């Protein structure tokens, strides 16, 4: 092999190591999010010795093994370069190099073990835990990046390699579909029973039909069933506990192949970076040592505020939460000083369209209340009508009380809360849930905070029409739709986390497309979900574009070119036409906060501020005018 080939292989190995570390970080961080959101679902039988972050770290090993095994050609076609990547992967899993005669046997074990795993197995938390579903695109991204590096490491990618990568994409989609089908089947069963009983009840004057239960929601609008989500989450967490243990034991104790065998391999000095802090943190929980939150209240509060500050936009919401936090902190100091305090209602209403960050902010509010000592736990329990209203008359009160009991000392977040109130007044089930909720909101106001969430119009009408709610809901927070600049920033935040970069032309194309979608939005506009949807589509297009490249470089892997950018509801022809004309954007100097108007072709390129005369890079800006979309002609728009 020539020196140039050696350099290319070493470059591929370095990129492969980076991708493995990024995948591990994705899983471990997801475990931390799941712990905060659903740790309370683990129950008394949970393994107190292993945190969810550690369990997800174990699961990521199965994921990278699966990618490796599914991307490799037949054994007869495997090359020395493939074995080198296998060595890197084994070292990543075991934390020690495997060399010499043991390497072949270890790779055979790795492939055989991975073949027994399904894509659904190694990605299930991202499919069934609501707080992790938004990261599915990042999971697909890492799978495609790893697979591409494996396929081209020997410099001879062919149609068979591309077919294997495409099959991985298809099987990941099938895993996603499998999860949706399971959730739909569970939800349909419950809805069908409820619908039959409601109809029967209506004939007796005491029930309501499903159209009234929907609160007037359009028929095509997807219905979220939080109770089904919680049930799936509980099952997924229990499954994760067992699967992580199985993977951990399987990778740690393979007779004659595992770590012991690695230690017996031919002594060879192997380079490579030290273990990342993420990996070290994930494995700090040892047997017999329960994971504990040793943060001080001050550290916990600072971390919650940092999470809030990192959110794109939502300036008014951030100011409201900061003011409320300052007030509660002052009241705590007054109580410690023996001064009189007030006890305002901390129950809230979050009003806004889908995808505006209501659930994310609710989770942060719970963290802040926990850090301030207002709530002893500070956890968040999510639900909706299905989690409060029972299937038979007389069962709604106990079911609502049970859900409230889960949320005691934390926050109960009720999405689409307006569906509990029927304008006709005939919904006895929803009325019973509301009355039960009102009583507990008042009786246990020191241990419970309720956040009611939903569309602005419906939520305003609900609160105004019910004196009990209007007197208890002390704060209403309005979540505005994200404008084009904010949507771009959300896209870049997701992209940067996955180590993608956006050149100027891609920024212009993205901003023009989001500007059109924003100016032509309706009440069902996806907001932040539109950005994530666009990112996921763009990653797939990039993967398809570079699949035929003769050599995979870091630049190819991380750069999203204009032709990679895809937005839901716009065809390539339309998006290209939107990006063609000259356009201006209003940007703000990051040094002196002075605004100025520039050509949007200069986004991402260093310029000099007209006010402070210092150089800065305007990443995004607000379009000065809306650009009209051309006719679609014969080009069919992408599904939203």
Image: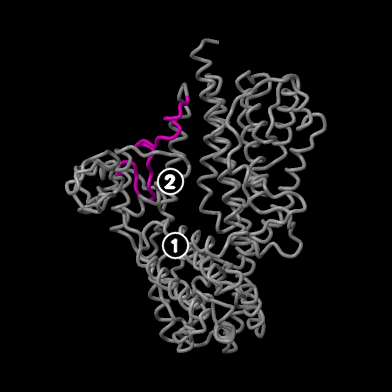
Nearer to the camera, 505 or 632: 505
Task: Tell me if residue 602 comes above or below residue 319 in the rendering.
Answer: above
Q: Is residue 266 visible?
A: yes
- Residue 35 appears left or right of 618: right
Nearer to the camera, 212 or 372: 372
Which labelled disc corresponds to residue 535?
2
Q: CA distance from mark 1 to mark 2?
A: 18 Å
Count residues near mark 2 (Cα–Cα under 10 Å), then give few for <14, some for 14-19, many for 20+. Answer: many
Residue extent of the magenta highlight? 552-575
Residue 153 at x, y percent in the picture? 55, 23
Residue 453 at x, y percent in the picture? 47, 72
Task: Tell me if residue 109 comes above or below residue 298 in the rendering.
Answer: above
Magenta stretch: includes residue 623: no
- Residue 325 appears left or right of 194: left
Judged from this view, the residue extending furthest toward the left is 610
Residue at left 54%, top 84%?
427
- Residue 321 appears left or right of 65: left
The way the protein has been coloured in the rendering is one colour
Residue at left 69%, top 50%?
285
Magenta stretch: includes residue 565: yes
Which-is-in-front pick, marks 1 and 2? 1
Query: In the structure shown, which secondary structural element does the residue marked by tag 1 occupy?
Result: loop
Mark closest to the chain's N terminus, 1 or 2: 1
Query: In the structure shown, which secondary structural element does the residue marked by tag 2 occupy?
Result: helix
Q: Is residue 627 visible?
A: no
Which labelled disc corresponds to residue 357?
1
Which labelled disc corresponds to residue 249?
none
């Amino acid at each position: 092999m020539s020196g140039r080939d050696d350099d290319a292989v070493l470059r591929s190995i370095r990129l492969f190591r980076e991708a493995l570390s990024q995948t591990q970080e994705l899983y471990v961080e997801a475990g931390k999010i799941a712990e905060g959101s659903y740790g309370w679902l683990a129950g008394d039988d949970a393994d107190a010795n292993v945190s969810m972050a550690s369990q997800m770290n174990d699961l990521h090993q199965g994921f990278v093994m699966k990618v490796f095994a599914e991307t490799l050609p037949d054994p007869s076609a495997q090359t020395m370069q493939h074995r080198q990547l296998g060595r890197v992967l084994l070292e990543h899993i075991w934390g020690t190099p495997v060399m010499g005669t043991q390497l072949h046997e270890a790779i055979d074990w790795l492939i055989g073990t991975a073949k027994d795993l399904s894509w659904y197995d190694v990605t299930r938390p991202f499919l069934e835990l609501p707080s992790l579903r938004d990261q599915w695109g990042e999971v697909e991204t890492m799978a495609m990046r790893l697979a591409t590096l494996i396929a081209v490491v020997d410099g001879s990618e062919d149609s068979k390699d591309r077919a294997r990568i495409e099959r991985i994409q298809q099987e990941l989609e099938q895993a996603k579909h499998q999860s949706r089908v399971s959730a739909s089947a569970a939800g349909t069963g419950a809805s069908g029973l409820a619908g039959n009983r409601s109809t029967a009840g209506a004939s007796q004057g005491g029930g309501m039909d499903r159209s009234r239960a929907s609160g007037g929601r359009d028929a095509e609008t997807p219905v979220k069933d939080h109770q089904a989500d919680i049930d799936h989450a509980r099952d997924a967490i229990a499954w994760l506990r067992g699967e992580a243990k199985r993977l951990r034991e399987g990778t740690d104790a393979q007779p004659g192949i595992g770590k012991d065998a690695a230690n017996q391999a031919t002594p060879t000095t192997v380079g490579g970076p030290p273990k990342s802090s993420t990996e070290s943190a994930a494995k700090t929980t040892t047997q017999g040592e329960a994971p504990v939150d040793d943060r001080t209240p001050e550290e916990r509060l600072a971390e919650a505020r940092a999470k809030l500050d990192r959110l794109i936009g939502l300036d008014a919401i951030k100011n409201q939460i900061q003011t409320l936090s300052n007030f509660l902190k002052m009241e705590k100091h007054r109580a410690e000083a023996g001064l009189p305090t007030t006890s305002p209602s901390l129950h809230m209403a979050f009003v806004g369209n889908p995808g505006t960050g209501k659930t994310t902010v609710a989770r942060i509010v719970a963290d802040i209340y926990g850090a301030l000592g207002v709530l002893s736990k500070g956890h968040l329990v999510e639900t909706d009508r299905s989690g409060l209203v029972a299937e038979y008359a007389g069962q709604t009160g106990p079911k609502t009380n049970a859900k409230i009991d889960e949320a005691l000392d934390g926050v109960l977040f009720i999405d689409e809360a307006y569906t509990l109130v029927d304008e006709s007044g005939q919904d006895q089930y929803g009325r019973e849930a509301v009355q039960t909720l009102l009583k507990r909101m008042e009786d246990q106001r020191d241990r419970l905070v309720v956040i009611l969430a939903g569309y602005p119009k419906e939520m305003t009408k609900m609160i105004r029409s019910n004196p009990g709610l209007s007197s208890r809901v002390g704060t209403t927070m309005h979540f505005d739709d994200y404008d084009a600049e904010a949507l771009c920033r959300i896209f870049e935040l997701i992209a940067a986390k996955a180590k993608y970069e956006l050149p100027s032309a891609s920024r212009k194309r993205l901003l023009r497309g989001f500007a059109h979608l924003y100016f032509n939005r309706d009440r069902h506009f996806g907001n932040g979900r539109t950005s994530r949807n666009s990112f996921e589509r763009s990653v797939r297009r990039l993967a398809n574009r570079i699949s035929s490249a003769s050599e995979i470089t870091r630049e190819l892997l991380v750069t999203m070119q204009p032709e990679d950018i895809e937005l839901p509801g716009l065809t390539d022809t339309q998006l290209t036409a939107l990006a063609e004309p000259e356009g201006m954007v209003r940007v703000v100097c990051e040094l002196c906060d002075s605004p100025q108007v520039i050509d949007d072709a200069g986004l991402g390129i260093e310029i000099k501020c007209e006010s402070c005369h210092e150089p800065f890079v305007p990443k995004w800006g607000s379009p000065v005018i809306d650009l009209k979309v051309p006719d679609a002609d014969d080009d069919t728009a992408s599904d939203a």
